[in-house]
Amino acid sequence: MKPPGISENPAGSYAPRKYWADVAEKFQSADAAGFAPVLHPDAPPWFNQLIDELQFRAIRRALAVAEIPPGARVLDVGCGTGRWVRRYRENGFRAAGIDGQYGMLERARAQRTEAPLLAGDACHLPFADAAFDAVTDITVVQHIAASLQRQALGEMLRVLRPGGRLILMELIRGKDGATLIDWFGQEFVLLDRLFVRMVQSLPGRGMRGASTIAASSEAGPRPMVGARRVYWELRHVTAQLSAWADPLAEKICPARLATHGVFVLRK
Ligand SMILES: C[S@@+](CC[C@H](N)C(=O)[O-])C[C@H]1O[C@@H](n2cnc3c(N)ncnc32)[C@H](O)[C@@H]1O
């Protein structure tokens, strides 16, 4: 997810802490599953449900590639509202989560997340060296300032035991510091992306306004009316069709065409 540029600092640049504090606060009740604060805050619940399903499929695949045994100690960095730690526990892992925002953790607790949840920064993980058998990072490093991303990845590797597994799902960029076991593209959603691009290229403020509104989170959840409603009704079709076709896209398209890459690394 690319953060819609709310929470700008006076210089006009993206201010991550304030951005996540804002979405945690304003969107914590936007949907029952707690997906809105960690996926696309301003999208309707069905869209986030669909994106979650695509991501869950990718994470199941990554866990199978990583061959993490039941009982493994798994840390989810930037755990948000806790969807992965809950699933890791259901898989029999001893899961824990850490996130920079109390608001996210509160929501995770409200979802009856049984795993230990800590407040802390990915760049300074409060754990001993080699404390975990696996570390996961689902769309977190992509939101950390470029100058700090290497430090965050270094921290994930520090707390990972030798031979442990690191799973990243991030916007595709080069990563280093560990051996890549495998990687694959995730979330092709080609038809939906084509539709969004077409809307964005329309002249004037008509439907383009709709897409801009759809991507803005400043005001919290807003009613689906007018152009915004039409925009999301059309995307209901393009997104569902794209999700249905994604398994085929995974097979026939180059991985770099996807919006995210899922990386499995060995320390
Ligand atoms: C896109 S959300 C993803 C949440 C979760 N990984 C998921 O997939 O549901 C990004 C999360 O990273 C957290 N985050 C961002 N920067 C962080 C940092 N430096 N340290 C810890 N957490 C951070 C945010 O608070 C937010 O919960």
Image (cartoon, rainbow, N blue to C red):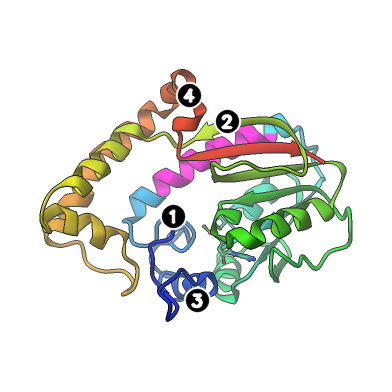
Residue 150 image position (x, y, % from top left) = 70, 55
Q: Is residue 102 above or below residue 43?
A: below
Q: Could you tell me which secondary element the residue under label 2 belongs to?
A: strand
Q: Which residue of the protein is positioned furthest toward the top in this rendering?
A: 252
Between discs 4 and 1, the one toward the N terminus: 1
Magenta stretch: give its range.
49-63
Residue 80 image position (x, y, % from top left) = 57, 62
Q: Is residue 39 left or right of residue 66?
A: left
Kind of residue sitting beneath label 4: Pro
Assess whether mark 2 and mark 1 are in contact (beta carbons under 8 angstroms).
no
Q: Tag on residue 254?
A: 4
Between discs 1 and 2, the one toward the N terminus: 1
Q: Could you tell me which secondary element the residue under label 3 belongs to?
A: helix
Residue carrying label 2: 184
Evaluate whether residue 78 shows in this view: no
**Residue at point 51%, 42% (across, down):** 55
Between discs 1 and 3, the one toward the N terminus: 1
Q: How far apart are the two marked residues, 1 and 3, measured between alpha carbons?
A: 15 Å
> Where's ligand 1: which quadrant?
bottom right
Along the line of sight, the residue nearer the viewer: 43 or 129? 129
Between discs 3 and 2, the one toward the N terminus: 3
Kind of residue sitting beneath label 2: Phe
Residue carrying label 1: 2
Q: Tag on residue 18?
A: 3
Kind of residue sitting beneath label 1: Lys
Q: How far apart are the two marked residues, 2 and 4, measured between alpha carbons?
A: 9 Å
